[in-house]
Structure formats: structure tokens, C-alpha cells
Image: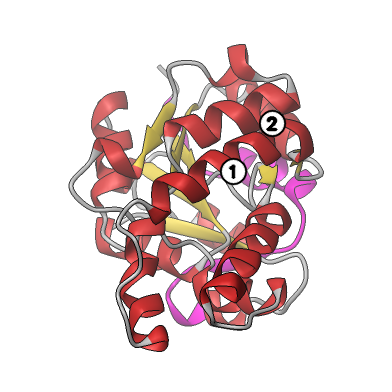
């Protein structure tokens, strides 16, 4: 199946597009991977930023802790996620950059008469730093959902279901835009169609989880335009 086939073949009219944040709207993962790799190397698990991305892409910091402790063979300080988050916020407030075509896609989604929200395994503090750096704080205001707002982050469906509920939409009326495997799993668990943003690969891993890959955010407005939408 191709992205246009997914959108044209929807059984329910599209009302809401739910965007992931990191790797979909904000090019922040290089910053996060660098800091995580440095922290874990200091703790005794030698790691490169590339390895950090492969192991932890799309995970919350608390969910990373058991994996880290198994590898290290010892407990790590319980305040580690908070301390790392503080460093992430500081770095992202300076270094966050937009994914090419992402901000344009947000404006285009509005122009098509569709609602949109952002659902992220990041904290609100991290998202605030990223969006301020991009200069789009006002654009995203009132549309943000963090894993801290719900019982469980991705790959559980809670975040996406909360975003849908906030917009008064059924899961079948939603489309998720994701780049991570936990995000694709969350969309499937929520019963939502998913486009998998995969600019640097064939997207096979995303496709295996039910997300249909696409390669450019500049293509997204045209894809959304072919989906059946409410006329009133």
C-alpha cells in the first residue's frame, strides 16, 4: 500500500492529524542522542550517538532506565531522568531545528480544514524549549500532549487517544504521523491510521508495524488533500 492509497481508502472521514514531535516536526534527535550517549558513557556504558538512536528512539526517559540498569548491572540514581531533562532543555533551547517542510505542513493542515495536535514522549518543558527555538510557540499553543499527561507513553495508545478525545474525535477519524517504532505501535494500538516518516530509509520496520512510509514532509499536504473529509 502507498500513502495515497491509505488516505484515499479511509473508511472514515479524516478530522484530526496527530503529529509526533521529535523527528517529525523538530530535528532534535541528534541533540538528544549526543547527550544520552555522553551520560551513559560516563556511567560506564560506552555508547555513540548512533547507538543511542538505535536503542532509544521514541522512548521516554523513565522507560529507558530499566534497560540501562540491566546493561550496567546496577541501579542508577532515580533523579537521572530529571537531570538529563534539564540538560536537554538547555541544549534544545539553542540547537533545535525544524524538520524540512514540517512547519509548512502544520499550516497546510489547518488550511485543509483539519484539526491537528502534537503527541510526544517528551516532557512539556522539552517541547516548550524546542518550539520556542523554532519560533512557533504561538502556533502550537493548546495543541500539545506529553507522556506525563497520561498513564503511559508510547508504545501504549494513551497519548494518541488523549489527543483524539481533546478534539472530540473517534480513533477512526484520526491520522498519526510518526517516525519511531514505539509511535507506530501506539498508533496501531489506538486503532489509528499511521504514516511513517522515513526520510533516510525504506521504512520497512515502520511498515511491518502498519505505518505506511513516506519520505518528505513537503509531500504531506498533498497526501492529506486526497483523504475524505467532512464537508460541513
Residue 1 spot, x, y in % from top left: 56, 74
Relative to 134, is 147 above or below? below
Dot 1 alpha-carbon crowd within 10 angstroms: few under 14, some 14 to 19, many 20 or more: some
Task: State left or right for residue 30 relative to residue 195.
Answer: right
Picture quadrant where residue 69 is located: bottom left
Count the marks: 2
For mark 1, give the secondary structure. helix
Relative to 173, is 64 above or below? below
Residue assigned mark 1: 87
- Residue sitting farthest toward the left: 151
Query: For the point 69% across and 40% down, which residue is it?
Result: 91
Q: Which of 47 and 22 is in front in this view?
A: 47
Q: Nearer the viewer, residue 18 or 14?
A: 18
Cα–Cα span, label 2 and label 1: 10 Å
> Depth-wise, is mark 2 or mark 1 nearer the camera?
1
Residue assigned mark 2: 93
Task: State left or right for residue 173 relative to residue 139.
Answer: left
For mark 2, give the secondary structure. helix
Quadrant including the C terminus: top left
Q: Which of 11 and 201 is in front in this view?
A: 201
Confirm whether the magenta stretch covers residue 195. Answer: no
Pointer 2 or 1: first along the chain: 1
Magenta range is 207-230
Residue 36 spot, x, y in % from top left: 59, 63
Q: Can residue 109 be seen in this view?
A: no
Amino acid at each position: 500500500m502507498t500513502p495515497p492509497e491509505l488516505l484515499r481508502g479511509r473508511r472514515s472521514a479524516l478530522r484530526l492529524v496527530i503529529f509526533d514531535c521529535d523527528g517529525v516536526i523538530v530535528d532534535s534527535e541528534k541533540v538528544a542522542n549526543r547527550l544520552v550517549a555522553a551520560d551513559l558513557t560516563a556511567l560506564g556504558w560506552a555508547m555513540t550517538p548512533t547507538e543511542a538512536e538505535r536503542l532509544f528512539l521514541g522512548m521516554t526517559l523513565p522507560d529507558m532506565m530499566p534497560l540501562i540498569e540491566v546493561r550496567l548491572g546496577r541501579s542508577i540514581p532515580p533523579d537521572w531522568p530529571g537531570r538529563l531533562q534539564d540538560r536537554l532543555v538547555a541544549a534544545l533551547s539553542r540547537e533545535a531545528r525544524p524538520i524540512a517542510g514540517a512547519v509548512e505542513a502544520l499550516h497546510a493542515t489547518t488550511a485543509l480544514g483539519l484539526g491537528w495536535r502534537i503527541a510526544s514522549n517528551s516532557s512539556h518543558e522539552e517541547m516548550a524549549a524546542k518550539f520556542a527555538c523554532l519560533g512557533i510557540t504561538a502556533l502550537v499553543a493548546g495543541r500539545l500532549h506529553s507522556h506525563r499527561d497520561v498513564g503511559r507513553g508510547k508504545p501504549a495508545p494513551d497519548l494518541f487517544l488523549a489527543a483524539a478525545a481533546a478534539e472530540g474525535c473517534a480513533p477512526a477519524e484520526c491520522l498519526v504521523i510518526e517516525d519511531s517504532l514505539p509511535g507506530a505501535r501506539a498508533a496501531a494500538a489506538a486503532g489509528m491510521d499511521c504514516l511513517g516518516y522515513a526520510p533516510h530509509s525504506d521504512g520497512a520496520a515502520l511498515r511491518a508495524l502498519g505505518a505506511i512510509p513516506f519520505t518528505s514532509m513537503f509531500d504531506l499536504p498533498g497526501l492529506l488533500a486526497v483523504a475524505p473529509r467532512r464537508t460541513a
